Amino acid sequence: MSTLPFWQHFAPDEDLSAPYTDRFRVRFAAHRLDLPLRVLPDGQKAVSSLLVNQASFPVMDALSENLTEIARSLAPDLIVGMPTLGLGLAATIARACGLERYVPLSTSRKFWYDERLSAPLSSITSPDKTKRLYLDPNLLLLLEAAERIVIVDDVVSTGVSLEAGVRVLAAIGVSPCAALCVMTQSNRWQGKFSFPVMSCFSSPLFKRVGGGWVEQDEL
């Protein structure tokens, strides 16, 4: 199934019911959005998917506005962006919160980087490909001067990627007061963090039942 038609338009104002076939419908602010279901490698579980860099501008604007509203309630003085899809969100949120800049983390190592300011990184969409997450040492002063750091990513699923970001910040003795993302995907990340993880919407893990998918009880 092609995901090209997804994330381009808002969905009708009505609920979908299980068993689901190819999509799951979520609500955020005054909108509903259909997310395609992606089958995990075991063939028996699936997750709903969102690629924010493939969304239409109206959908992306609505998501950014919702995230910004949450961010403002946290009164951050520094936004840290997770690569790759969290970087654009972090920049947009920082600007909307009246900040002059944000701090990007990176998976591309420059020759002046310090391995001590890095952590291994993997995700649910690339479980067999572990990279490293880096902080440019030139940005240390910004982090050390901040009192309320909010870390931004597109999706939090198992929490592994977000944990890597937290470890990089911990290497210089700082920690976020909160994390923001567009979607929390399942509840496998819960219990891993000492700070709140806030999102526009959440979606469950699904299990196969006959010719469709239903929400799976978790934890």
Image: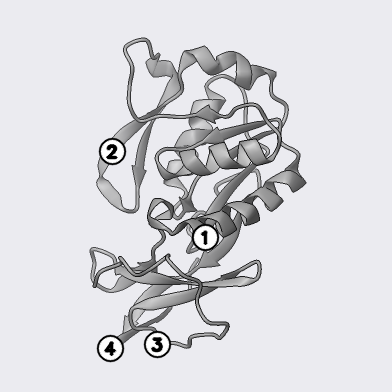
Q: Nearer the viewer, residue 9 or 114?
A: 9
On screen, 219 above or below 21?
A: above
For disc 3, the marked residue is 19
- Pointer 1 or 4: first along the chain: 1
- The label shown at residue 58 is 1
Residue at x 76% of width, y 39% of height: 75
> Which of the 4 image quadrants contains residue 62?
bottom right
Q: Is residue 72 left or right of residue 37?
A: right
Give me the C-alpha separation between circle 3 and circle 4: 8 Å
- Kindly indicate whether the residue at mark 1 contacts the one at mark 3 (C-beta within 8 angstroms): no
Question: In the image, residue 209 lies at what x, y percent?
Answer: 33, 86
Q: Kindly report which numbered mark, 1 or 4, lies closer to the viewer in this rendering.
A: 1
Residue ID for mark 2: 130
**Quadrant in the picture for residue 129:** top left
User: Of tags 2 and 1, which is closer to the observer?
Assistant: 1
Secondary structure type for disc 2: strand
Q: Which residue is more in the foreground, 92 or 123?
A: 92
* Mark nearer the N terminus (3 vs 1): 3
**In the image, is residue 164 above or below residue 184?**
above
Kindly check if marks 3 and 4 are in contact, taking CB atoms under 8 A apart as contact: yes
| Cα–Cα gap, marks 3 and 1 | 29 Å
What x and y, as percent, mark residue 54? 37, 55
Q: Is residue 27 above or below residue 68?
A: below
Mark 4, residue position: 211
